[in-house]
Image (cartoon, rainbow, N blue to C red):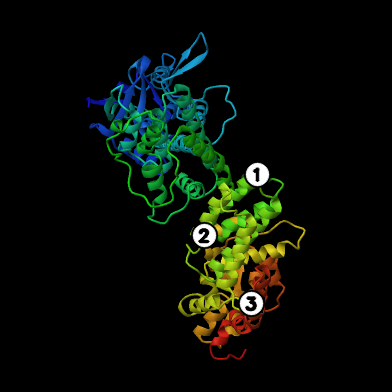
Amino acid sequence: MSELKTLKSLFGERTYTIPDYQRGYIWDTQQLADFWEDLLNVKDTPHYMGVLSIKENENNTYEVIDGQQRLTTCIILIQSIIEFAEDNNFTKSNNKIVFSEYESDSVENIRSKYLYENNIATNKRKYKFQYICDKESSLYFNHVILKEPNTPELQRTLYTNKLENAQLFFRDKLNELYKNNNEIGIKNVYDKLVNKLKFNEFIIEKDFDINVAFESMNNRGKKLSILELLKNRLLFLTTIISDNKKDIIDTKSAIVEAWAEIYKQLGKNKDNNEELLDDDFLKTHWIFYWGYSRQKGNDFEEFLLKKQFVRKKVYESLKLSNLITKSDYNDPDDEDISYTGTTNPDNLTLAVINNYVSSLAGSACFWVDSFYPKTASRYINKQDIVELLDKFNRVNAGAHFRPLITVALQKYEENCLTKELLIKLLQTIERFVFIVFALNHFRRNSYDAKFYNYSKDLYHGYNNVTVEKIIDDMNTILKNDCFSTDGNIKTFFNEYIQDKFKTSDGYYAWDKIRYFLYEYEMSLTKNKIRNPRVKPEILLKDKDKTIEHIYPQNDTNTYWTSRFGDLNEEQKAYYKNAIGNLLLLSQPINSILQNDSFDEKKKAKISEDGKTTLRTGYMEGSYSEQEVAQEPEWTSKEIIKRSTKLIDFMEEHWNISFSKSCKDILTNPISSLQSIEN
């Protein structure tokens, strides 16, 4: 360990690189906010930034082993400060923007010290800090963050999205600081950044095994994902698996390219609300490539890092090839543990690694497509596939079908599966998931091992498994577990809804009420020439603003007291939460406005000044709203009538039937109470 060093003392003649075994930039807004807050709060006492572990290579170039997130953040902030000063015409001294009393802190000198130097003869830049961990991060950092001209077409990845987020974060913070403190505030931040933040520099010996060091480091900021650890492990194993330098270089290149492709796929839908997690993809691939086991919660991590990709398997391969003797391998592999799950009988060779990483990279796009089919160019003219994939995501149950869907999409793209069969499979999955989980409320992991294994068999062509066989098996499960011998669906849903009326809010408390009402809305849309009036994004909004009780929960309006005032509170609650009284709105509205009379709800409601539409009336809303608006009155009779219509739709849409007694209660739950005269 050496003395604490500032950013200013770390830079100068040195060049820092982020090597291929490293992940890219991964800090989120929370880490950036903590960094910024620490920076603002720095006073006279320096702020400790932790260990910066680096390895010296040739020509005064250093690999960053630990600390790249913090170092990258500092460089992005320096660039942001320079841009801000130039864009806002900071005061100049001798025709230069200077951040202190010393000319060495001019914009030009800061840029050449921390960012890059320009070679006038070649018109090329020599970067002081650069990524080589993946091509996309390198191009994005140089051309977007550091403004290198002649920007090529850039591929967005999870890492480039994080870089962009950091850049935008600091732009906002500098703007805010400038409004309050003018140039002085910006210059103070620069001074703190380069002079007050202190790193404990640790230089690793040249002959030290960097891959092993990297894996065992205490990585700060955000813990490495299993996918990131696996990349490093594979890069390390290639160096001991063969003496053929070309084969090693080729395999390392394949690994780096595979991970770049994976993160490109994971990051290409940056505008979506939910970030796809790399370890979720890795687990999905593990399921259909290696095989699923249910030993522990982290089985895929245990298998990949402690069973499959370990030194012991390399040595076993070398022994079989007589490249080492038994005495050469007499130390137990400290990462190897007992594992009883599915294992690969092959020993570990470069071919095994190459096949695996090729499969990983090749499957990533199909896994992402299963979440975001609308952005996949391959489905532009295949709206039926897109709608079914969207439907599977909306129903949000039975996640164990994700590996099977990923494999099916890949087989379809490889022309190993017809479009008709793919559509039939997706339709069957949606029906299976709705009946098993939305209606019968089986445990969420019901049948998961069966369909995980099917995904593996289908991917590899094992056990003569076909899509037709999988579809037949799903229908057989439904027949045996969800339907009675008379062909009617079992009474699980009826019992579930009755319990919700007794303990909660009836159909309104059903976890799939929005999915069901959206499907009903879409069924009305199919008969219209116009576009859908409800977008699926509304299902992400608060339920109390997107599903309306037509007869409202707060029923003090005289319209409602005159029609339901003779009922007791329990009877009122049954009507309020009946399925026929629940309406999916085309636009979220304030829940207060849901308490208007039926006549008021049918018309648009305008603010007193006439400038703002407070709510869209049923007559101009969704097709479901327009249908309800045709009713002249809204009483218990209309509620039962619409409930009957919705349950009829459920039967037809999912090809099920309820017994008469079950259906009577589902359409009129209050019938289980004392008879009511209306």
Residue 383, x across and y down, in percent: 69, 51
Front disc: 1 or 2: 2
Q: Which residue is mark 1?
A: 413
Q: Nearer the viewer, residue 93 or 2?
A: 2
Numbered circle sitting on residue 672: none
Marks 1 and 2 in Cβ contact (< 8 Å): no
Residue 288, x across and y down, in percent: 52, 49
Q: Nearer the viewer, residue 325 or 560?
A: 325
For badge 3, the amino acid type reads Gly
Question: Which label's residue is closer to the chain start, 2 or 3?
Answer: 2
Choose top left, top right, bottom left or bottom right for residue 634.
bottom right
For badge 1, the amino acid type reads Glu
The total of numbered circles placed on residues is: 3
Residue at figure coordinates x 63%, y 55% from the top left: 467
Q: Which image quarter is the C terminus in? A: bottom right
Q: Nearer the viewer, residue 651 or 417?
A: 417
Q: Which image quarter is the N terminus in? A: top left
Question: Which label's residue is closer to the chain start, 3 or 1?
Answer: 1
- Residue 27 in the figure: left or right of residue 383: left
* Numbered disc 3: secondary structure: loop
* Numbered disc 2: secondary structure: helix
Mark 3 residue crowding within 10 angstroms, few (<14) / some (14–19) / many (20+): few
Residue at figure coordinates x 48%, y 63% from the top left: 444
The answer to whether one can see residue 594 in this image is yes
Numbered circle sitting on residue 487: 3
Question: Which label's residue is closer to the chain start, 1 or 2?
Answer: 1
- Farthest residue in the top direction? 121
